[in-house]
Image (cartoon, grey):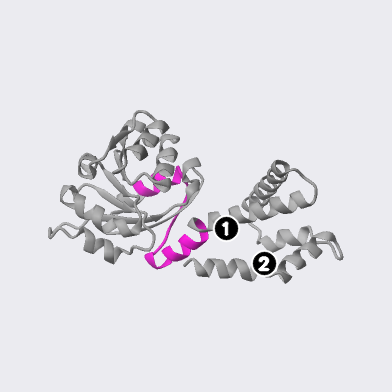
Amino acid sequence: MKITIIGTGNMGRAIVRGLTGGTLIKPFDIACADESQDALDRVREIHGAIRTFTDNKAAVDAADIVILAVKPWLLEEVIYGIKQALDYERQIIISIAGGVEFARLDKYLDNHKDVVPALFRLIPNTAVEVRQSMTFIASQNATQSQIDTVVRIFDELGTTMLIGERLMAAGTSLASCGIAYAFRYIRAATEGGVELGLYPAQAKDVVLQTLKGAVALLEANGNHPEAEIDKVTTPGGLTIKGLNEMENAGFTPAVVRGLKASV
């Protein structure tokens, strides 16, 4: 299985790191294309066997899967430059450009041939580089075998969820933007720990381990988060006082508003 990734910015490189750390795709079966030689040099630092190109058309020639990892406003130009080199009967085309719907992708990819491409929209997050991404997948004109192939690849890079295209914006908010929101909580809690007397590195380690424990509990028992909160909120205790202060400051409404704003 040969994969070409066009665009080696933060997300493109994150996918490369994830793939090279897995077992399904060998580094010599990965090709990357970018107009910046510096960007390609950074990719080669990940693994020297990765093939790199400054010519997008040359990069897609032998690919079974083409991943378009460019900014949404560059997508039309990039597709225009490669679409005559694409083989719609054989190749799977994946776009990770946020907000670019299938209808627009169809328009960009139209080459006036009878064959339509197997097309996917994916929303991963940057944890894909450590194979812990939450990746949402929507497909169009794909066979079950092609869907299974894409799911299998990205399942090795974290967790996948097959959804209809109408939910891609929600997936972007919860997982792609959401990882930044999680980082912001970690930063805030770390700062709070420093105010309480811990050194910054100590506070961050405490917050990270606490979050790992919270996730592990929910994964192990399947409880609603509120059920686990109830276990540590004794009447008149410290936890409920802290929670109430956070809610008085707008914690839950702020999270919901942030998610809605990023749709």
The percent position of residue 174, horizontal first and vertical second, equals 52, 61
Looking at the picture, how far across and down is residue 94, in whole percent? 32, 52
Callout 2, which amino acid?
Phe
x, y percentage for residue 27? 36, 32
Residue shown at 26%/43% (left/top)? 64
Q: Which residue, as the protein is rendered here, is positioned at the far top? A: 48
Q: Tell which circle, 2 or 1, labels the residue nearer the N-terminal end.
A: 1
- Per the image, the residue denoted by label 1 is 181
Picture quadrant where residue 48 is located: top left
Asked which secondary structure carries label 1, the reply is helix
Asked if residue 151 lies in the magenta stretch, the reply is yes
Q: Outermost residue, right direction?
A: 236
Distance from the alpha carbon under mark 2 to that under mark 1: 12 Å
- Horizontally, residue 81 falls left or right of residue 48, namely left
Q: Measured from the top left, where is residue 102 in percent x and y?
A: 30, 63
Disc 2 target residue: 251
Instruction: Say the numbered circle drawn on residue 256.
Output: none
Element under disc 2? helix
* Front-most of residues 4 and 117: 4
* Closer to us: 191 or 129: 191
Callout 2 crowding tier (Cα within 10 Å): few <14, some 14–19, many ≥20:
few
Residue stretch rendered in magenta on the structure = 149-175
Q: Is residue 106 left or right of residue 227?
A: left
Is 185 in front, or is 121? 185
Q: For the point 75% across and 50% down, which residue is it?
A: 193
Q: Is residue 51 above or below residue 198?
A: above
Location of the N terminus by quadrant is: top left
Q: What residue is rendered at 45% in x and 42% in y?
A: 156
Q: Is residue 227 magenta?
A: no
Name the residue type under label 1: Tyr
**Dominant secondary structure, magenta:** helix
